[in-house]
Image (tube, rainbow, N blue to C red):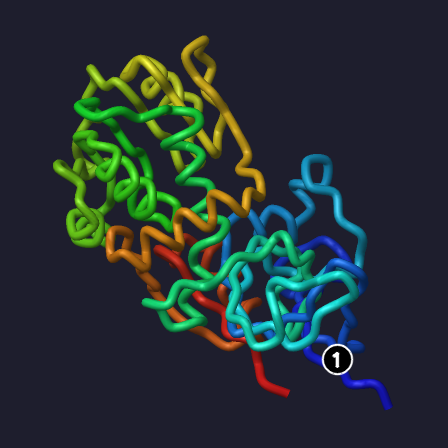
Amino acid sequence: MSPTMTAARIHEYGDASVIRYDRIPRPSPGPGEVLVQVAATSFNPSEVGLRAGYLRDLLPVTLPYTLGLDLAGTVVEVGAGVDVPAAGDRVVGLVEGAAAEYTVAAAGSLVRAPERLPLADAAAIPVAGLTAWQAVHEHARVEPGQRVLINGAGGGVGLFAVQLAKLAGATVIATAGPRSAAAVRRYGADEVVDYTTTPLPGGMDVVLNLVAIGPEQAATLATLGEVIVTIATPIDSPRATHFVARNEPAHLARLVALIDKGELLVEVAETHPLTGLDEIHRRAEAGQTRGKIIIQGDKS
């Protein structure tokens, strides 16, 4: 009998109850691919919209669909033509279908996992880290001496963005609620603004918006900086750029290098088993999650 595995899948769009933990055949790698035993994936808020069907035009998927975009794991089998990575290598990458015990990935999409982190914790890096890297370095082009306002600094992307902006030499003003303020300060923000009680400051060189906002706040953010970058709600301004992060292994490798040098820290807020993913979706929709949540792969 062919080996099987557990995968967190949706067969239809809907609320968190549509997430099922199916036993399905374990995949095999094709040419240029590797089979990875998943140590962990991580939860990303965008997957709530994907699961509910809100993103079907932007991110069309074929149902049934295995959730999970962040992958940390160990290569267990390689396909034809693959020299790197090799069986036994610990890897990370942005890979669809990572909410499973095993997944197949293009060999070129993976990079070596950081040596300074537990392998499961490395699943916090790909989506959030790539988004922050591209926001700070490609779109905002943050430079030494600039004043950078990061709206939504307490989330998974925000904690990377705060650190990357600081490493670029900027003065970082971060918005965070009471639950996240201490973490944001710990990761290097020069000033923390409690958005629940205090107006956001103006006169910024760069504004990074990392959270969904309403029309009134979007209009406000449009007036606060010379360069505005948003990964969530589009902002109506000729100075604003809205983008969706792309899978760029070279950027991921640079993030890993910074982590291994001790210059970039990774914070994991919570860790849960694969079969708890539906409950994480429910909590996220109720506004009860913060930071990066790791979903560990179950062991067959």
Residue 275, compared with residue 188, is above or below; it is: below
Q: Is mark 1 on a helix, strand or loop?
A: strand
**Residue 72, image x and y in percent?**
52, 66
**Label 1 sits on what residue type?**
Arg
Q: Quadrant of the N terminus?
A: bottom right
Residue at 37% from the left image edge and 68% from the top image edge: 115
**Left or right relative to 207: residue 273:** right
Q: Tell me which corner region of the image, top left, top right, bottom left or bottom right, holds residue 132.
A: top left
Q: How crowded is mark 1: few (under 14 residues within 10 Å), some or many (20 or more)?
A: few
Q: Tell me which corner region of the image, top left, top right, bottom left or bottom right, holds residue 106.
A: bottom right
**Left or right relative to 114: residue 207:** left
Q: Quadrant of the C terminus?
A: bottom right
Residue at 21% from the left image edge and 49% from the top image edge: 187
- The furthest residue to the bottom: 1
Residue 295, compared with residue 213, is above or below; it is: below
Residue closest to the eye, 268 or 73: 73
Residue at 51% from the left image edge and 77% from the top image edge: 273
- The furthest residue to the right: 1
Residue at 26% from the left image edge and 24% from the top image edge: 143
Q: Mark 1 points at which residue?
A: 23
- The furthest residue to the top: 238
